[in-house]
Image (cartoon, rainbow, N blue to C red):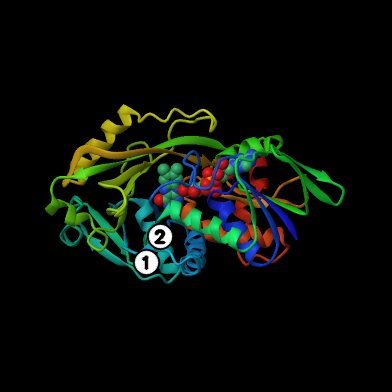
Amino acid sequence: MKIAIVGSGGVGSQAARHLAKEGHEVLLFEQFTVNHDLGGSFGESRIIRKTYADRLLTQLMGAAYPLWDDLQRESGEDLFVRCGGLYFGDEKDEAMRLVEDALKVNAIAYERLDAHATNARFPAFHLTQNEYAVFQSESGFLRASACVKAAAQLAVKHGAQLKENTTVKAIVRDGAGLRVATSAGDFGVERVIVSAGPWTGKMLASLNLPLRVSRQQYLYLRTKSPEAAKKFVPGTCPVWIHSGSIAGGGEYYGFPMDGKVEGVKFAQHKIGPIVNPDAVDRDFDPALKAEMLKYAAERLPDLTAEVTYSKTCLYTNTPETDFIVDAVPGLPGAFAVGGLSGHGFKFLVLLGRIAADLATGKKVPYDLSRFKFGRFAK
Ligand SMILES: Cc1cc2nc3c(=O)[nH]c(=O)nc-3n(C[C@H](O)[C@H](O)[C@H](O)COP(=O)(O)OP(=O)(O)OC[C@H]3O[C@@H](n4cnc5c(N)ncnc54)[C@H](O)[C@@H]3O)c2cc1C
């Protein structure tokens, strides 16, 4: 089957690899270059975890894990650092209860630690007495840019045609197939997968989707001493999420040292300023920096206030943070995966698999009704 993919970012590169490996004729269009830093997937790390306050997402992560192992094996690269993950919060926090519920329902082993035990075992953190943690040993981080590059390279190795610096301008029905109009000419195909990340709303403008693209910024801080740095190495320091830690909604999260960028990375998972993906102010917001330094001083006492690296990235948010995974209404043969709402990286290899299966008419063994376009009409 001849299949066009719009965007070689997180989803597109994974879908292209699966399809090319199965012998389909794949055209992978990218408006910039693979692993550019203007969308949603660039960077050293993304958290991967089964610990979700949601039964379906926890179940889907169970399916994603072996696919990440496959990608790691096939690429021969070190993509997944299994350093464990800590989800902590107040003992009255509802999200903490839901996380435990989802882990139990999906029979995933975890440890429940009180504040004292957490601080003793993971000395990078400071939990207060009314807090507790859930530790799940299979959590960790994915080396994000390396994952995207590995998938795109494997897609090409399996025969996909990667067309960088080529913008898809329109997708239209053309007889029994589809025509993809690009900055490098028109291409006739049988199927299209739209995996345009922050540009999904623009690509599917006629659907008037309620997607909001937000600017997200993270930073790395230097540790206070070589002794302090030892508290942040993978093994001693897990990935972490501090549930309910931002007044008004949202949470801080972070990583052990990734061995690539100096310092310790952390961020806010909270929708940032809404932006046009083609015109993003990428200067670090001084008010956000001040909030983050205050948090670090209270909760990560071995970090200095010295920023070693910072970056801007984009979330593509749906109203309820559920993904879009569906056939495109009014355009038979076209499918879309997007709206990953700041938590989709860990699912990418599975979403790529699902996109490939939808496009080739295979049965998808998951209940994806939550991810359909139709929900926006309600
Ligand atoms: C700061 C930050 C932290 C995050 N942390 C986590 C985390 O810890 N764990 C987690 O699971 N997830 C996390 N996420 C979310 C996750 O990284 C994203 O949801 C995911 O990477 C987005 O992938 P995508 O394929 O939808 O978009 P992208 O990777 O942006 O890919 C879309 C691609 O389509 C291309 N494109 C768009 N339009 C066109 C066109 N018309 N023609 C050709 N090409 C086009 C773009 O150039 C781009 O390359 C985070 C996101 C951010 C920004």
Q: Give coordinates of residue 371: x percent, y percent.
A: 60, 52
Q: Is residue 230 above or below residue 321?
A: below
Q: Can residue 349 be seen in this view?
A: yes
* Label 2 Cα neighbours within 10 Å, binned few <14 / some 14-19 / many ≥20: many
Q: What element carries label 2?
A: loop
Q: Residue at x 48, y 41 (%)?
A: 315
Q: Nearer the viewer, residue 259 or 131?
A: 259
Quarter placement of the C terminus: top right
Q: Which quadrant: the N terminus?
A: bottom right
Disc assigned to residue 49? 2
Q: What amino acid does circle 1 point to?
A: Glu
* Of pointers 1 and 2, the one earlier in the residue sequence: 2
Q: Where is residue 156 in the image (x, y as percent from the top left)?
A: 60, 58
Depth check, front residue: 25 or 170:
25
Secondary structure under the numbered disc 1 in the rendered image: loop
Q: Residue at x 43, y 56 (%)?
A: 53
Tell me the residue at 19%/50% (across/down): 128
User: In the rendered image of this protein, does residue 313 appear above or below residue 135?
Assistant: above
As drawn, which residue projects farthest toward the right? 175
- Indicate the position of residue 112 as horizontal and vertical percent values: 28, 64
Say what amino acid the circle numbered 2 marks.
Arg
- Check whether the beta carbons of the residues at disc 1 and disc 2 lie within 8 A of each other: yes
Q: Which of 4 and 210 is in front in this view?
A: 4
Is 159 displayed left or right of 38 in the figure? Answer: right
> Dot 1, crowdedness within 10 Å: few (<14), some or many (≥20)?
some
Q: In this view, does 182 lie to the left or right of 366?
A: right
Between 64 and 149, the one nearer to me in the picture? 149
Seen in the image, is 217 located left or right of residue 31? left
Q: In which quarter of the image is residue 161?
A: bottom right
Q: Which mark is residue 284?
A: none
**The CB of the residue at mark 1 lies under 8 Å from ligand 1:** no
Report the residue marked by disc 1: 138
